[in-house]
Image: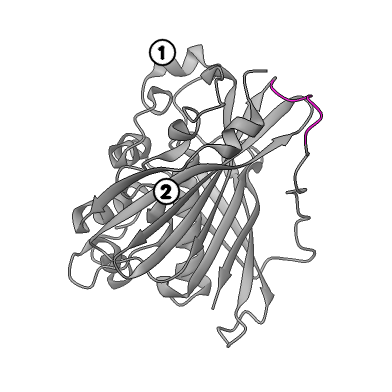
Amino acid sequence: MPIDAAKALAAEPRTGEITWGHKDVQLYDLGIGAGIPATDPDELRYTLESGLHVLPSFATVAGAGSPGVIGGLSMPGVDVDLARVLHGGQSLTLYRPLPAEGTATTAGRIAAVHDKGKAAVLVMRTDVADADGPLWTDDAQIYVRGEGGWGGDRGPAARRETPAGPPDRTVERTIREDQALLYRLSGDWNPLHADPGFAKLAGFERPILHGLCTYGMTLKAVVDTLLDGDVTRVRGYATRFDGIVYPGETLRIRMWRDGSGDGGADGGEVRVAVSAVERDDAPVLADTVVAHS
C-alpha cells in the first residue's frame, strides 16, 4: 500500500517560517473578487492598505500557502499518484485576528488517515504561531482515489443536511474571466487553473477556478452580509468541495443563521450552500459552516 498510515502519523512535524505583508493580503483580496465597486467604502477595507481588514481565509495562502496540500503528499509514509488526488475539504480554526503583516512559524503533519473503502483521506494539519502565540490551525482533507480498503478507521461522517426552510440571505457573486489567473499569483501555480491544454488533459473543457478561491469568496460574502463586515468575528470556517467552478460563472451563496446568530457571548454559526447558477445550481461547496462570535 503506497500509504503507510502508521508511518505517516508517527512522522515528526515539518517546520518552517512564513512572512506576509499588506501587498500579499491585498493581492489575495483582489483574487477573491474584492474591490467591486472600486470606491465602495465596504470594499476599500479589503483593498486599501490603511486600515486593511484581513479575512481569516487569507491563512490558506499566507507565505504562499506553505506547506499546503503538496507538502502533505511528500510526508513520510505517503507515496501517491498526483493524478488520483482531490482536495476534498478545508477547515480553519482562528485563535485571534490575523494581522496585515507578520512573521510566523509553521508546523505541518498528517493528523489523520481514514479508510473510505475506495479512497484514503489524509488530513494535513498546519499549526501557525507568531511571537505572541498561536494564530491558526488549518486542516486540508486530501482524498486519494484507489488507496483505501486496508481496513483502517473510516473517520467521522462529514456530511450535514442542508438546513430546512428558506435561507436568511442569498447573494450572487460573478466570477471574472481572469479571476483564476489573478488568484494563482497568491501561490497556487497548478496549470489546471490557467492552461487550457492541461485542463483538457485533466478532463475539463477549460481551466477551472481554485476551490480555495471559491472558499474565500464565500467567507467574504458571509462576513459582508451577516457579520456586519467584521472579519474579527470569525472563529472557524469549514467546507467540503462538492463541485467545480469555471471563471465567468456566477456563484449563488445561500446562508442560514444557526445558534444565537446575534453576536452574543455564545456566538453562533452560519450554515452555507454554494452552487453554480448557470449550470442549474450545480453544487460547489457543501457542509459549509462559519463559526462566529
Q: Which residue type carries mark 1?
A: Gly
Q: Which residue position is annotated with label 2?
A: 107
Q: Where the C terminus falls, by quadrant?
A: bottom right
Residue 241: where, in percent of width, then height?
Answer: 60, 41
Circle 2 — which element? Answer: strand
Residue 253: where, in percent of width, then height?
Answer: 57, 56
Q: Is residue 156 above or below residue 222?
A: above
Is residue 173 in view? no
Circle 1 — which element? Answer: helix
Viewer-proximal residue, 155 or 50? Answer: 155
For the record, the magenta segment spans 147-152
Residue drawn at the location 27% of the way across and 55% of the way down: 25
Viewer-proximal residue, 90 or 175? Answer: 90
Q: Which residue position is annotated with label 1?
A: 197
Mostly what secondary structure, the magenta segment?
loop
Residue drawn at the location 59% of the way across and 84% of the way down: 262
Callout 2: 10 Å neighbours few (<14), some, many (20+)?
A: some
Q: Is residue 39 left or right of 119 when viewed as pictured?
A: left
Q: Is residue 234 above or below residue 26?
A: below
Give the spatial CA distance, label 1 vs label 2: 36 Å
